[in-house]
Image: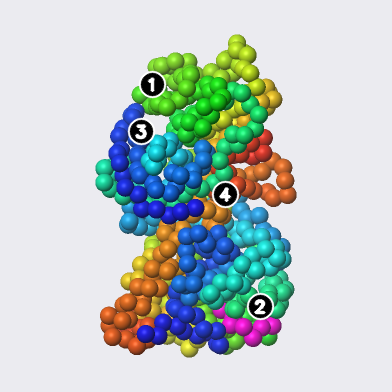
Amino acid sequence: MKTSFNIRDVEFKNRVLVASGTFGYGDELKDLVDVAKLGGVITKSLSWKPREGNPPPRIVETTGGMLNSIGLANIGVHQFIEEKLPYLEKLDTVVVANIAASSVQEYCDVLSLLNDERGIDAFEINVSCPNVKEGGLSFGTDCDATADITSKLRVLTKKPLIIKLTPNVTHISEFARAVEEAGADAVSVINTVIGMAVDIRTRKPKLSTVTGGLSGPAIKPIALAKVYEVAQAVEIPILGIGGIATVEDAIEFLLVGASGVQIGTMNYVDPTASAKIAEGLRQHAEQNNLKDVGDLVGAIDAKVEFSVLQSWL
Amino acid sequence: MIQEIDIVRERYEVAAGIHVLRFASSHISRYARPGQFINVRTNAGLVPLLRRPFSICRIEGEDIEIVFNVVGIGTSILASKRSGDTVDVLGPLGASFRMKSSFDTALMVAGGLGVAPFPFLTQHLSDKKVESFIGAASAEKLWTAHLQNVHIATDDGSKGFHGTVVAMLAEYLKSNRVRNPKIFGCGPTKMMQALSDLAKMYEMDCELSLEGTMACGIGICQGCPVGRVNGKKKYALVCTEGPTFNSQDVVLA
């Protein structure tokens, strides 16, 4: 049974990765999770300087999901290299550094610094954080800016370059196409969906930043539709992400065209969920007499011409 | 830090809408210290999605007790647990109360369900004098089991001192000499702010147990910051740097 897949020349031992921001810097969960059972670990978003993040409240639970407005709180790339990378380097899995920045120059600086580090196997670029005023989503919702960042980073690294796309645009497939043309090796689809919750007693928003990013099972149908749309538009691998809680969820993402999946919010609920899903995928493939879990990728029996997608694809 | 599936021993209502849940924990009960908390997944489904943090209220042998008010879906589910049911528990989490510092009298001050960590703390302070100041909205909302030298305050005057628990403590401090005290406080933010101010006035060491909205409970989600008064960093995380903090170190907002 083949469980692995590749992005460029990097082999992931299985198709389940843990999403940025939901697995810290890898070391926090070492007592609870056998990281070797994961296809890959994606770090918390790293910026050039440490970021304090947004004021509280930063989190609110909603039906089947959670809104967050963390504001990219992180220790900064220098402290990451010094304190966290030595641990990550020893892990028996692929390590993907996620980068967030507020200028094109900052993206380039952080990537260049990490590119020489042995422990980093690939990069995921967060152009789509909805919770910081400068940069973040403002890049991710501008197709030309997203393509521009991609091409500038492309020339700086030979390691896999994955662009994490926001669903908070009209046609995500246009963005996927633009970054593919600019040299991206893969796309992560999707980042959080902008959402809001209000305290009816105080009549105040429940998050300090008024709106935040919705994640968790509540967004899974949205994420699936976005992955399906992107899969019609590009050839590069897609990492499907958005509300995956069970192995059945992961299979749905593969069927609509994701080459791999990322588990996010569910890591908070059950730290062992990702490893269970990876094992569940293998079992599902075995039970269906597949030789490769990858046989599920894009195997959906649907005709895109029957979908409203066709009008803009 | 361990993730356990634990068997519920019993669950009973101790005051209006207030329940104690007792479950057998092979590991967490062994390593937990007063002030630490656990993060509980109330059911295997996805609503509610996130775990719920609870102070460890008491440990007896292998058993852990938590106390909670029924306020939402998660606590409603917990309030329907019966002997033999299971709970998915992550713990022990966070920093414990500092019990080694030199004090002779522990003044435990709780507003409402802020009483939760104090039975466990009382268990560990057998060599100290303990005075417990417990405030509640009304007599029917009071739970004062497993505490020592209990002083009661109710907002509506239905039992004990008529007023806030901090007002009661202020009265007590005026008329009693307390030998080398340390305050341990837990409760609503307003109450803890008042307590912090009182502690400052009397120059008493005061440690608070804070609550924070959190997803993971282990420092990953960064969801539970509390403002710091001093130090290089603007925020501390309630889950890993707390939930216990010196009252003068944090901004209670």
Q: Position of residue B34 (x, y in %)?
A: 51, 37
Element on which disc 4 rests: loop
For disc 3, the marked residue is: B18
- List the single residue furthest toward the top: B175
Q: Say which amino acid is labelled 3.
A: Ile
Pick whichever of labels 4 and 1 is earlier in the sequence: 1
For disc 1, the marked residue is: B139
Is the image coloured rainbow, by chain, by secondary structure, or in one colour?
Answer: rainbow
For disc 2, the marked residue is: A118
Q: Where, by quadrant of the figure, is residue A163 drawn?
A: bottom right
- The part of the chain drawn in magenta is A156-162
- The reply to whether callout 4 and callout 1 are in contact (CB within 8 Å) is no
**Residue shown at the point (66%, 55%) measured from the top left:** A52
> Disc 2 sits on a residue from what chain?
A
Pick whichever of labels 1 and 3 is earlier in the sequence: 3
Pick whichever of labels 3 and 4 is earlier in the sequence: 3
Q: Which mark is residue B165?
A: none
Q: Position of residue B33 (x, y in %)?
A: 51, 40
